[in-house]
Image (spheres, rainbow, N blue to C red):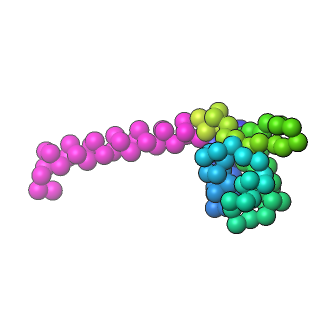
Amino acid sequence: MTYEESLAALADPTRRSVFEAVARKPSAVGALADQLPVSRPAVSQHLKVLTDAGLVQVRVAGTRRIYAVRPEGLAELRAYLDQFWGDAMDSFANEINLKERYPDA
Protein backbone atom coordinates (compact mmCIF):
# COMPACT_ATOMS: atom_id res chain seq x y z
CA MET A 1 0.00 0.00 0.00
CA THR A 2 1.15 3.53 -0.69
CA TYR A 3 0.39 6.93 0.69
CA GLU A 4 -1.18 7.78 -2.69
CA GLU A 5 -3.79 5.05 -2.19
CA SER A 6 -4.42 6.27 1.35
CA LEU A 7 -4.90 9.86 0.26
CA ALA A 8 -7.18 8.81 -2.60
CA ALA A 9 -9.26 6.66 -0.25
CA LEU A 10 -9.64 9.48 2.28
CA ALA A 11 -10.50 12.09 -0.36
CA ASP A 12 -14.18 11.15 -0.25
CA PRO A 13 -15.92 12.88 2.71
CA THR A 14 -18.26 9.97 3.44
CA ARG A 15 -15.39 7.51 3.35
CA ARG A 16 -13.47 9.77 5.74
CA SER A 17 -16.47 9.64 8.09
CA VAL A 18 -16.47 5.84 7.93
CA PHE A 19 -12.71 5.81 8.62
CA GLU A 20 -13.08 8.22 11.55
CA ALA A 21 -15.87 6.08 13.04
CA VAL A 22 -13.71 2.96 12.78
CA ALA A 23 -10.79 4.88 14.29
CA ARG A 24 -12.93 5.79 17.30
CA LYS A 25 -14.14 2.23 17.81
CA PRO A 26 -13.71 -1.00 15.83
CA SER A 27 -17.17 -1.86 14.53
CA ALA A 28 -19.25 -4.09 12.30
CA VAL A 29 -20.92 -2.72 9.17
CA GLY A 30 -24.35 -2.54 10.80
CA ALA A 31 -23.08 -0.50 13.75
CA LEU A 32 -21.31 1.87 11.39
CA ALA A 33 -24.39 2.28 9.21
CA ASP A 34 -26.46 3.07 12.31
CA GLN A 35 -24.24 6.04 13.15
CA LEU A 36 -23.77 7.37 9.61
CA PRO A 37 -26.24 8.74 7.07
CA VAL A 38 -25.48 5.99 4.54
CA SER A 39 -26.82 2.51 3.89
CA ARG A 40 -25.16 -0.72 4.93
CA PRO A 41 -24.19 -1.55 1.33
CA ALA A 42 -22.60 1.90 0.99
CA VAL A 43 -20.67 1.43 4.24
CA SER A 44 -19.47 -1.95 2.96
CA GLN A 45 -18.25 -0.36 -0.28
CA HIS A 46 -16.40 2.37 1.60
CA LEU A 47 -14.82 -0.20 3.91
CA LYS A 48 -13.64 -2.19 0.88
CA VAL A 49 -11.87 0.86 -0.52
CA LEU A 50 -10.32 1.62 2.88
CA THR A 51 -9.23 -2.00 3.25
CA ASP A 52 -7.76 -2.09 -0.26
CA ALA A 53 -5.84 1.13 0.56
CA GLY A 54 -4.39 -0.57 3.65
CA LEU A 55 -6.02 1.80 6.14
CA VAL A 56 -8.51 -0.66 7.64
CA GLN A 57 -8.27 -4.32 8.60
CA VAL A 58 -11.02 -6.81 9.28
CA ARG A 59 -11.31 -9.70 11.72
CA VAL A 60 -14.04 -12.29 11.96
CA ALA A 61 -15.94 -12.52 15.27
CA GLY A 62 -18.54 -15.27 14.95
CA THR A 63 -20.81 -14.25 12.10
CA ARG A 64 -19.69 -10.62 12.13
CA ARG A 65 -16.77 -8.89 10.52
CA ILE A 66 -15.23 -6.23 12.75
CA TYR A 67 -13.38 -3.39 11.05
CA ALA A 68 -10.54 -1.53 12.74
CA VAL A 69 -7.83 0.91 11.75
CA ARG A 70 -4.68 -0.76 10.42
CA PRO A 71 -1.78 0.94 12.27
CA GLU A 72 0.73 0.14 9.53
CA GLY A 73 -1.42 1.93 6.97
CA LEU A 74 -1.52 5.02 9.11
CA ALA A 75 2.25 4.82 9.60
CA GLU A 76 2.78 4.93 5.82
CA LEU A 77 0.52 7.97 5.49
CA ARG A 78 2.09 9.67 8.49
CA ALA A 79 5.63 9.15 7.14
CA TYR A 80 4.55 10.88 3.95
CA LEU A 81 2.99 13.81 5.81
CA ASP A 82 5.86 14.09 8.31
CA GLN A 83 8.29 15.01 5.56
CA PHE A 84 6.25 18.15 4.94
CA TRP A 85 5.92 18.90 8.63
CA GLY A 86 9.70 19.12 8.97
CA ASP A 87 9.89 21.48 6.00
CA ALA A 88 7.07 23.61 7.41
CA MET A 89 8.79 23.86 10.79
CA ASP A 90 12.10 24.80 9.13
CA SER A 91 10.33 27.55 7.16
CA PHE A 92 8.67 28.80 10.33
CA ALA A 93 12.03 28.90 12.15
CA ASN A 94 13.60 30.79 9.23
CA GLU A 95 10.78 33.33 9.31
CA ILE A 96 11.22 33.86 13.06
CA ASN A 97 14.97 34.33 12.60
CA LEU A 98 14.36 36.91 9.86
CA LYS A 99 11.91 38.85 12.06
CA GLU A 100 14.43 38.85 14.91
CA ARG A 101 17.20 40.17 12.63
CA TYR A 102 15.00 42.66 10.78
CA PRO A 103 12.10 43.59 13.10
CA ASP A 104 10.86 46.41 10.84
CA ALA A 105 10.63 44.23 7.72
Q: Is residue 87 left or right of residue 1?
A: left
Q: Is residue 33 visible?
A: yes
Q: Is 24 on the left-hand or right-hand side of 56?
A: left
Residue 51: x %, y % from top left: 75, 44
- Residue 11 in picture, x, y percent from top left: 64, 57
Could you say where residue 48 lies in the image, as x and y percent from the top left? 79, 49
Per the rendered image, the range of residues in magenta is: 77-105
Our reading of the magenta stretch's main secondary structure is: helix
Q: Is residue 46 visible?
A: no
| In-front residue for pair 49/100 | 49
Find out whether residue 83 is within the magenta segment: yes
Furthest residue in direction right, as rendered: 63
Q: Quadrant of the C terminus?
A: bottom left
Q: Residue at x 25, y 47 (%)?
A: 95
**Residue positioned 84% across, 43% down in the render:** 64
Q: Nearer the viewer, residue 56 or 32?
A: 32
